[in-house]
Amino acid sequence: MNPAVSAVTDRIIERSRPSRAAYLALIERERDTWVGRPRLGCANLAHAYAGTPEDRDTMKSQHQAMNIGIVTAYNDMLSAHAVYYRYPELMKVWAREVGATAQVAGGVPAMCDGVTQGYPGMELSLFSRDTIALSTAIALSHGTFEGAALLGICDKIVPGLLMGALRFGHLPMVLIPGGPMPSGLPNKAKAAVRERFAEGNATRDELLDAEIQAYHSQGTCTFYGTANTNQMMMEVMGLHMPGAAFVNPGTKLRQELTRAAVHRLAAIGTHGDDYRPLGHCVDEKAIVNAAVGLLATGGSTNHLLHVPAIARAAGIIIDWEDFDRLSAAVPLLARVYPNGSADVNGFEAAGGMPFVVRELLDAGYLHRDILTVAGGDLTDYGRKPVVSDDTLTWTDPGASGDDTILRPAAQPFSPDGGMRILQGNIGRACIKVSAVERERWVIEAPARVFADQLEVLDAFKNGELERDVVVVVRFQGPRANGMPELHKLTPPLGVLQNRGFKVALVTDGRMSGASGKVPCAIHCSPEALGNGAIALIRDGDLIRVDAETGTLTALVDAAEWAARTPATPPAAATGMGRELFGMFRGQADEAEKGASAILAGAGL
């Protein structure tokens, strides 16, 4: 193993020792005392079986055969999840092939950040993750399942499914993806139209046509944002069938991978000789693998929230310092939009996750010896799935098919992973520099302070930002308004940068997984509503965002800084259901712990 990766892993293991031991004791107790089907009363079982009469006799007479609970995020408003429409009925057939049964245990909400970006609904987005975790727990609470298939892909859905499922960690579970849509309008061309629209040089009809050409069919969006980063993580954690992440929907290979996942799930239950409970699969090494994969592929900054939250649900504590140390050691192997011109289909064609996993394993950056759902160790995930004569097999991915997209560990795009912690008198924040030109890693400019991203857009349209500027958008943290993504700021800030100005963003909110070329100090903690120092910044303060030295500083006299009174927060917003999430906002943890209300409320 790479010594830096080993050291971070040891640091996490030691820090997590008490909480991990408590978690493992919990799932051991749950396994031994689980209110499973043999223990349920006859009336309880009759209720559970009534909805699936075609499998009732099997479920009644064969309690030793696995009954798989399907937790699905299907809806047909969200392209990535529309593909799940027919999955349950097919999965029931595939379960019967191996003597098992399957039932839809429950559905979880799956909102689309792409639809809500820049609008009030986005303030529900992060807390939809906690809602999904709660919904997963409800789905699995009936005690009638010996394992679960988790159908989810996008931004908050996969983390939420795992957070809920890990509290049932004595059960074996498999994550089943649906794959990305085929490529449409190239992402770079789409971004260019967005910037032209921001400048007033493209009409709304032109912009809509471009967006529809980019997002044109079922499947995940093709850029490497949070949704596709989720799929990468499930591979390096060993929770998919190997190579399942980026196979397009509707293909024979996609169908056979899903079928294999159902068969495999039936084989790793408590009654077999290959028991692989989720809570043992997701251990400290698997969490480190997730962080390494994130850095090696230039993945979404949202996972600096999601990985700590997933880890906490399994009794594991990882912090931003761990990410920072790993980033200094892990090479960047992939250039996928917004960190390059290729989309995830180009990434898959060039070798995809099998190539990345093989390279990182051989170079000692990933833990090979984790408990995967596939049966072996992580070595299996360095092989590419293929279907030949209706038979699913795996083969070596070979060399990179395009070294502008994927490179071997010995010849990376960058020797480090491009994530940094920034610390200073403003607080502690994160920055992703893998897509930022080196000359923009240090920005020093006067602040312009806002409390809402729409105010930024108005200022841009009015020509008020035509200068070197650090745009500060505060009261965007989880306790303030649910920590929405501020993705609508990317085009105008990109335009200002293109005009030659020095531009940066500082915020206690999030940026999209598609954020790219503008330096952004995000997740600033403590947040403004918690009397974080970001609430002390005033218009005109000279701000230094320095990814070279890892500092985030207001260049203000120390005595004056200490004497300042924090800005008054705006009133809590109502409408679009936001008021219903007041208890989530009030309970939410800081960003570095995962910004979760339910984990904080559970004392985890």
Image (cartoon, rainbow, N blue to C red):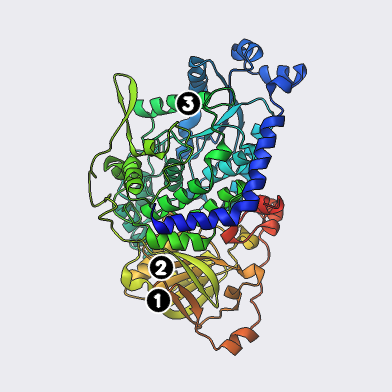
**In percent of the image, x 43 and y 37: which residue is there?**
377
Closer to the chain start, of discs 3 and 2, is: 3
Residue under label 2, please give it.
519
Q: Quadrant of residue 348?
A: top left
Residue under label 3, please give it.
264
Q: Which mark is residue 546?
A: none
Q: Check if mark 2's residue and mark 1's residue have beta carbons within 8 Å.
A: yes
Residue 508 visible? The answer is yes
Q: Secondary structure at mark 3?
A: helix
**In percent of the image, x 61 and y 26: which residue is there?**
146
Query: Which of the two marks, 3 or 2, is nearer to us in this view?
Result: 3
Closer to the chain start, of discs 1 and 3, is: 3
Residue flagged by tag 2: what amino acid is it?
Pro
| Figure check: 392 above or below 220 | above
Where's residue 280, x and y in %?
56, 39
Residue 418 visible? The answer is no
Where's residue 224, x and y in %?
38, 49
Closer to the chain start, of discs 2 and 1, is: 1
Along the line of sight, the residue nearer the viewer: 156 or 401: 401
Residue under label 1, please give it.
443
Where's residue 464, x and y in %?
45, 76
Q: Quadrant of residue 245?
A: top left
| Figure check: 203 above or below 560 | above
Residue flagged by tag 3: what amino acid is it?
Arg
Along the line of sight, the residue nearer the viewer: 460 or 379: 379
Query: Which of the two marks, 1 or 3, is nearer to us in this view?
Result: 3
For the residues labelled 1 and 3, the Cα–Cα distance comes to 51 Å
**In percent of the image, x 56 and y 48: which residue is there?**
310
Q: Secondary structure at mark 1?
A: strand
Decide if residue 276 is on the left or right side of residue 170: left
